[in-house]
Image (tube, rainbow, N blue to C red):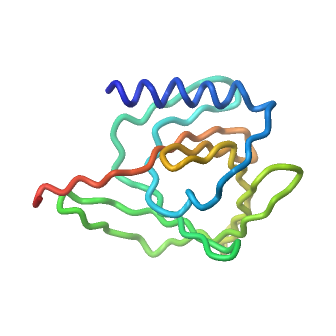
Amino acid sequence: MKVFRILLVLSFVFVSCQKEKHEIDIKHLDGYWEIVQAQNPYGKNVIYSVNTQVDYFELADSIGFRKKLKPDLSGNYKTSKALEQFKLIKENDSVKLHYQTPYDSWKETIISLTDSLMLIKNEKDFLYTYKRFEAININE
């Protein structure tokens, strides 16, 4: 719980310091990410204390995808067939993910990205805070 509070405070610090541009080290994007908080443009926060899904990101040469996975207690993942492909584009001193599916297209901006924390804002100004997912394996 202490780690969650620290992540929450860090996400507020990152949001309040948005005026200063940070270099995004995109090599940290690949892997499993768990959403911990969503904030709408009106200031309402939703905190996710337990997640049944994680997002898996993979990027190669500015082309990538995001996939929803359900981890189980044996350390394995169940996956859906849904895959959201994106192009990574640098625009106006920011890093954007341009998604394209057969049903829709949209953009998200990476506000901050480290090896353990990621902040993403969508076109409707919703801010999502992710932490690196650590699988639990009860067989070990």
Quarter that holds the N terminus: top left
Q: Position of residue 63 (x, y in %)?
A: 67, 74
Residue 126 found in image quarter: top right
Going 75% across and 54% down the picture, which residue do you hit? 95
Q: Nearer the viewer, residue 88 or 79?
A: 88
Residue 139 found in image quarter: bottom left
Q: Nearer the viewer, residue 109 or 40?
A: 109
Q: Position of residue 87 (x, y in %)?
A: 72, 69
Position of 108 relative to 1 (above/below): below
Which residue in the rendered view is the most extreme toward the right?
Answer: 92
Residue 64 found in image quarter: bottom right
Which residue in the rendered view is the most extreme toward the left?
Answer: 139
Going 26% across and 67% down the picture, which residue do you hit? 76
Quarter that holds the C terminus: bottom left
Position of 74 relative to 59 (above/below): above
Going 60% across and 70% down the picture, which residue do you hit? 59
Q: Position of residue 118 (x, y in %)?
A: 57, 45
Q: Is residue 45 left or right of residue 107?
A: left
Going 42% across and 36% down the picture, which residue do you hit? 48
Q: Is residue 17 left or right of residue 31?
A: right
